[in-house]
């Protein structure tokens, strides 16, 4: 199975690969820059090359880059939206050096403008970035798949249900000749907090995801427990098996025939020993290992 966790990017790519291996992971997630925003460190080409060799030798990937939390394509102020657009475009350029990576972002918060306007703004940003990319790169699109993360519906978050995710996808891809370009990262804590009962009706939730978004779009799972009850719209992650979702339900996610081949990323803050233990537990309880 493909399982790993969120790792600090402060030591570079090779260090993340080595850390992943040391805790039994074969995938990992990392922030492309400070999660609160700001400039990215210049890319160290030697480190990237060393990582790519190491990743191939150790069967690591796909790696999942996570955009900073401050990126809000649906912000009310133009400079907030411009920042989001610049950061994402720059992140995608940088990720060309690690082909096959995926790029996950929180669609955004509409801050009172309404979900419909939020969807317009987010899809507007995505389509501008991709159209400009195509112009600059001789008709090609990024080699990185951009993923929309399912959100819990805290505050004015857009992407609080599958229909909003679908609406962003449609509004974006309709401006790019209806090519299939975007994917989805399903966060177990977020969908639970968003009101999808993955504990008692995982099959029903997946059937709904399939009919609204399409399971073919699902590229990654954020495997988190939740501190809160179904539909709480809170987004407070809990360690695996310590929350309201619980270990049994999370293992049904890991072992589900429609999900088991996807990469799973743990992202509830944990020290490395904690992640190592969680990964070992999940592997032990998984059908595929
Ligand atoms: Fe996230
Ligand atoms: Fe997440
Ligand atoms: Zn979260």
Image: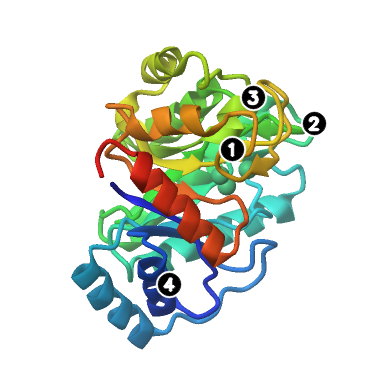
Contact between marks 2 and 3 (CB within 8 A): the answer is no
Mark 4 and ligand 2: say if the CB distance to the nearest ligand atom is below 8 Å: no
Circle 2: is it few (<14), some (14-19), or many (20+) Cα within 10 Å?
few
Q: Is residue 228 left or right of residue 45?
A: right
- Mark 4 and mark 3 lie on one chain; the one further toward the N terminus is 4
Residue that protrudes farthest toward the bottom in the picture: 46
| Residue that appears at 56% across and 19% down | 196
Mark 2 and ligand 3: say if the CB distance to the nearest ligand atom is below 8 Å: no
Picture disc at residue 225: 1
The residue carrying mark 3 is 116
| Residue that appears at 28% across and 46% down | 1
Quarter of image, ligand 2: top right
Circle 4: is it few (<14), some (14-19), or many (20+) Cα within 10 Å?
some
Circle 3: is it few (<14), some (14-19), or many (20+) Cα within 10 Å?
some
- Taking depth in this image into account, of 211 and 172 the one nearest to the observer is 211
**SS at badge 1:** strand
Contact between marks 1 and 2 (CB within 8 A): the answer is no
In this rendering, is residue 85 above or below 216? Answer: below
Give the spatial CA distance, label 1 vs label 2: 29 Å
Q: Please name the colour scheme applied to the rendered image.
A: rainbow
Contact between marks 4 and 1 (CB within 8 A): the answer is no
The residue carrying mark 4 is 19
The residue carrying mark 2 is 112
Image spot of residue 158 (x, y percent): 63, 32
Front label number (1 vs 2): 1
**SS at badge 3:** helix
Give the spatial CA distance, label 1 vs label 3: 30 Å
| Residue that appears at 32% across and 56% down | 62
| Residue that appears at 55% across and 24% down | 164
């Amino acid at each position: 199975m493909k399982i790993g966790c969120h790792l600090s990017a402060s030591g570079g790519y090779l260090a993340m690969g080595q850390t992943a291996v040391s805790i039994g992971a074969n995938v990992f997630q990392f922030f492309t820059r400070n999660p609160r925003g700001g400039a990215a460190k210049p890319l160290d080409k030697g480190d990237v090359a060393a990582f790519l060799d190491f990743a191939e030798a150790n069967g690591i990937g796909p790696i999942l880059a996570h955009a900073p939390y401050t990126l809000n394509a649906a912000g009310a102020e133009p400079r907030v939206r411009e920042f989001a657009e610049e950061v994402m475009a720059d992140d995608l350029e940088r990720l060309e050096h690690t082909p096959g990576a995926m790029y996950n972002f929180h669609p955004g918060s509409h801050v009172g403008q309404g979900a419909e306007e939020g969807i317009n703004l987010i899809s507007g940003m995505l389509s501008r970035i991709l159209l400009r990319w195509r112009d600059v790169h001789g008709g090609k699109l990024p080699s990185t798949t951009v993923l929309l993360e399912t959100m819990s519906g805290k505050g004015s978050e857009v992407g609080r249900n599958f229909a909003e995710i679908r609406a962003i996808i449609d509004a974006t891809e309709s401006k790019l000749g209806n090519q299939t370009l975007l994917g989805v990262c399903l966060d177990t804590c977020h969908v639970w907090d968003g009101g999808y009962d993955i504990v008692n009706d995982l099959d029903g939730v997946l059937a709904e995801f399939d009919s609204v978004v399409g399971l073919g779009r699902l590229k990654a799972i954020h495997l988190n427990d939740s501190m809160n009850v179904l539909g709480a719209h809170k987004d407070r992650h809990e360690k695996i098996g310590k929350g309201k979702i619980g270990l049994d339900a999370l293992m049904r996610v890991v072992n589900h025939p429609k999900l088991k081949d996807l990469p799973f990323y743990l992202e509830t803050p944990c020290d490395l020993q904690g992640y190592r233990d969680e990964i070992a537990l999940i592997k032990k309880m998984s059908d595929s290992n």
